[in-house]
């Protein structure tokens, strides 16, 4: 199968570390057993300095650590990382760089973001934003519809247990890497970290998220160097403004054959015949999960 060959990292809903079975009762009083997503703390250190404790599902801690530091501007694209050590028992990940670092002042300047699980950004949110140069990438609607169908065809932790966000790094109509976490910012950071470790070029990529298209999402996409940002959710006004300023193509409310583009729409090539584009199955609507689908939601 073509997607199996191109998808480098995919969700593993069967991983017993990521969900837990719990019992309870439904609205009729009947006894039920349901899968719930696990979250656990992960404390990040950079060269011996404690940076932050994050709530995460616990998979791919090294990618999460690197991506978080990159998107906070604490790790530079040309930094030499000499070690990333993770201790599962202590729930600690330590990133070591050849460059000496001291972010005491930056850590004092916090911004509480709109991310799920209350994301926190340190320092100046807009640091380096104005200088970013993104390619004027085009997007064919035929790619977009095939891409959405392939992402929706993936077995995901969301469909198994819900209460989670997903992000995908894509090229044309193919998802390459798909990550999930309890907060969309964590899922974004995991992909940023993976791209850093694998020296993945961003200029020909599309970034897909299940989360809202907020200022934070646009800023992180720009920092990753990706020119197209796609979501099945809606927009914020500042997110749209920043996307237009940076030259990011911003497409939201993607469900079935419907979407709305509020930035970079002049670079969309409308080559798909909508008569042959299928509507989205209800099981992929957000706020649905395996339990919700069985209950007829």
Image (cartoon, rainbow, N blue to C red):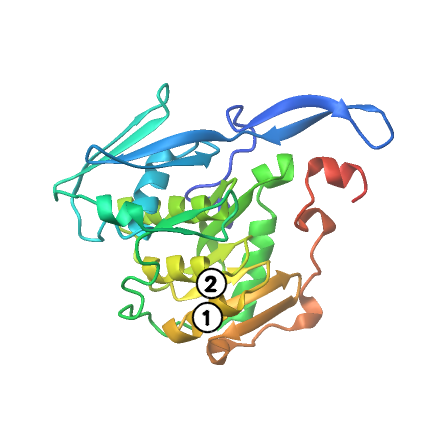
> Residue at point 43% right, 41% down?
9
- Structural crowding at the residue carrying mark 2, measured as other residues with C-alpha within 10 Å and reported as few (<14), some (14–19) or many (≥20): many
> Residue at point 65% right, 67% down?
258
On the image, the x and y values in percent for residue 261 come to 55, 72
* 228 shown above or below 28: below
- Structural crowding at the residue carrying mark 1, measured as other residues with C-alpha within 10 Å and reported as few (<14), some (14–19) or many (≥20): many
Q: Which mark is residue 229?
A: 2
The residue furthest right is: 28
> Residue at point 52% right, 27% down?
15
Count of marks overlaid on the render: 2
Left or right of 82, for residue 266: right
Q: Are marks 1 and 2 in contact (CB under 8 Å)?
A: yes
On the image, the x and y values in percent for residue 230 come to 51, 62
Secondary element at image label 1: strand
Q: Which mark is residue 249?
A: 1
Quick one: quadrant of the C terminus? top right
């Amino acid at each position: 199968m073509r997607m199996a060959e191109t998808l480098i990292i995919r969700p593993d809903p069967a991983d017993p570390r990521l969900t837990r079975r719990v019992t309870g009762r439904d609205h009729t009083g009947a006894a039920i057993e349901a899968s719930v997503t696990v979250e656990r703390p992960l404390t990040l250190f950079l060269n011996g300095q404690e940076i932050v404790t994050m709530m995460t599902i616990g998979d791919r801690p090294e990618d999460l650590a690197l991506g978080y530091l990159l998107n906070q501007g604490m790790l530079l694209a040309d930094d030499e990382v000499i070690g990333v050590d993770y201790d599962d028992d202590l729930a600690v990940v330590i990133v070591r760089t050849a460059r000496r670092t001291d972010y005491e002042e930056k850590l004092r300047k916090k911004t509480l973001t709109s991310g799920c699980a209350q994301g926190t950004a340190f320092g100046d949110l807009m640091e380096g934003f104005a200088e970013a140069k993104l390619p004027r990438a085009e997007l064919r609607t035929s790619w977009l519809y095939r891409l959405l169908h392939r992402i929706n065809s993936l077995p995901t932790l969301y469909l198994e247990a819900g209460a989670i966000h997903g992000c995908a790094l894509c090229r044309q109509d193919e998802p390459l890497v798909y990550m999930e976490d309890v907060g969309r910012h964590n899922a974004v950071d995991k992909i940023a970290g993976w791209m850093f470790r694998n020296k993945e070029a961003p200029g020909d990529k599309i970034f897909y998220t299940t989360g809202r298209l907020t200022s934070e999402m646009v800023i992180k996409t720009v920092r990753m160097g990706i020119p197209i940002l796609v979501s099945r959710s809606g927009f914020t006004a500042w997110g749209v403004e920043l996307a237009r300023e940076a030259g990011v193509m911003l497409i939201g409310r993607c469900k079935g054959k419907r979407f709305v583009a509020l930035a970079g729409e002049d670079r969309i090539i409308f080559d798909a015949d909508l008569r042959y584009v299928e509507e989205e199955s209800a099981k992929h609507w957000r706020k649905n999960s395996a339990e919700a689908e069985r209950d007829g939601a």
